[in-house]
Image: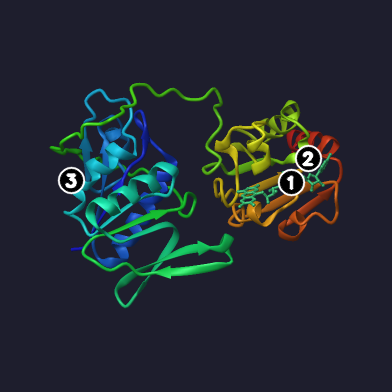
Amino acid sequence: MFKVLVIAESSGDRLNVSTLEVCRAASELSAHLGGHWGMLVDQRAADSAGGLAPEVSVYDLQGVAYAGPEMLSDIAAQVARAVDMVIMPATSTGKDVMGRLAQKLDAPLAQDCTGFEVMAGSPVFKRALYGGKVIAHVKLSGELSLVSFRPRSYEPILQSDEVVKARPCELLLPELKAAVTLRSKASSQRPEVTEASFVVSGGRGLQGPENWHVLEDLLDALGPDAALGCSRPVSDENWRPHSEHVGQTGRAVAPDLYIAVGISGATQHVAGIARSKCILAINKDPAAPIFKVADYGIVGDLFEVVPSLAAAIRSGP
Ligand SMILES: Cc1cc2nc3c(=O)[nH]c(=O)nc-3n(C[C@H](O)[C@H](O)[C@H](O)COP(=O)(O)OP(=O)(O)OC[C@H]3O[C@@H](n4cnc5c(N)ncnc54)[C@H](O)[C@@H]3O)c2cc1C
């Protein structure tokens, strides 16, 4: 019977949203291929996994704060041979783990997929190329295949009432050259830019880091499921952290609503936002290329438009 294994990413006792999305992909894959699926998870998050996956295997990091790609790929390599397919979210950690796993197990890998279809009984994975202009259909051959799915390609799986007892795995922890002993959350309580339903991104039009409060006010009006993004020059100038950089060389986002503020719409930026369900552009230049990809556009000075928009959202329909 075809077996799919999800390698979970977790923070403390909580599974990351991108892992819940990949669980949905695993459930659909096993349903289409007549198999079953399970999850490999850090012991600390085992309780969260209990009502989600039909089978849960846990490993104990024995005091190590966080399993980075080096450790996680070593752990996954010990169980991957018992399954037909291993999947992970295509986060920076997930892509790193899967690359290492492919090398360790000499297995074929499709990174950053956005979906799959079954053709002649085999899964064929979809990958967006050239900023989403071309969709490659990738078929993997071999006894074991590895796939990472781009965040927000699937709806997160929902908790079921069924409690599944986690099964501990007897695994050897690798000897690491460097181990993470402490992880603390950055001061922002905002979701990751790849996981948020609303993303407000600022570009060079903001003129400097001191003006970001304008976007933060809009973010507050949108609520807790909104995250900040930025264009590459903004992070290159250290106005904002690189984790917020959106585009071809940054994070690919797929929110329900992407608001591009003072961003011209260069192809490299647009490559990272093409999967947004709706794009609103705010730019003072009516000829800015961002308006070609936007669903809605406001031509005007962002320092006037954004506060009015935030006020309108706060006052409701
Ligand atoms: C190999 C390579 C990879 C790259 N990867 C990325 C990437 O991943 N992501 C990325 O973003 N870029 C990337 N770039 C850079 C990209 O080509 C653009 O240079 C960059 O996206 C432009 O950033 P911007 O829109 O913030 O700035 P600009 O192009 O300078 O645009 C600023 C915009 O703000 C508007 N504006 C100014 N003042 C106001 C105001 N008061 N009110 C309203 N609007 C205003 C202007 O009309 C203008 O359209 C890459 C480039 C290369 C060569």
The residue wearing badge 3 is: 78
Looking at the picture, which amino acid does disc 2 mark? Gly
- In the rendered image, residue 108, in percent from the top left (x then y), is placed at 30, 61
The residue depicted at 70 percent of the width and 45 percent of the height is 259
Q: In this orientation, which residue lies closer to the viewer: 12 or 164?
A: 12
- What whole-number distance in Å separates the C-alpha atoms at marks 1 and 3? 46 Å
Q: Are marks 3 and 2 in contact (CB under 8 Å)?
A: no
The disc, 3 or 2, on the residue closer to the chain's N-terminal end is: 3
- What whole-number distance in Å separates the C-alpha atoms at marks 2 and 1? 6 Å
The disc, 1 or 3, on the residue closer to the chain's N-terminal end is: 3
Q: Please determine whether, in this image, residue 176 is positioned above or below residue 292.
A: above
- What whole-number distance in Å separates the C-alpha atoms at marks 3 and 2? 50 Å
Q: Please determine whether, in this image, residue 153 is positioned above or below residue 179.
A: below
Determine whether, in the image, residue 214 is placed left or right of residue 155: right
Looking at the picture, which amino acid does disc 3 mark? Gln
Give the residue at the far left of this rendering: 170
Q: Secondary structure at mark 1?
A: loop
Residue 162 visible (yes or no): no
The residue depicted at 29 percent of the width and 74 percent of the height is 121
Q: Secondary structure at mark 3?
A: helix
The residue wearing badge 2 is: 205
Determine whether, in the image, residue 201 is placed left or right of residue 141: right
- The quarter holding residue 91 reads top left
Looking at the picture, which amino acid does disc 1 mark? Ile
Q: Are marks 1 and 3 in contact (CB under 8 Å)?
A: no
Residue 133 visible (yes or no): yes
- In the rendered image, residue 267, in percent from the top left (x then y), is placed at 67, 57
- In the rendered image, residue 146, in percent from the top left (x then y), is placed at 31, 57
Which circle marks residue 263 in the picture?
1
Q: Is mark 1 within 8 Å of ligand 1?
A: yes
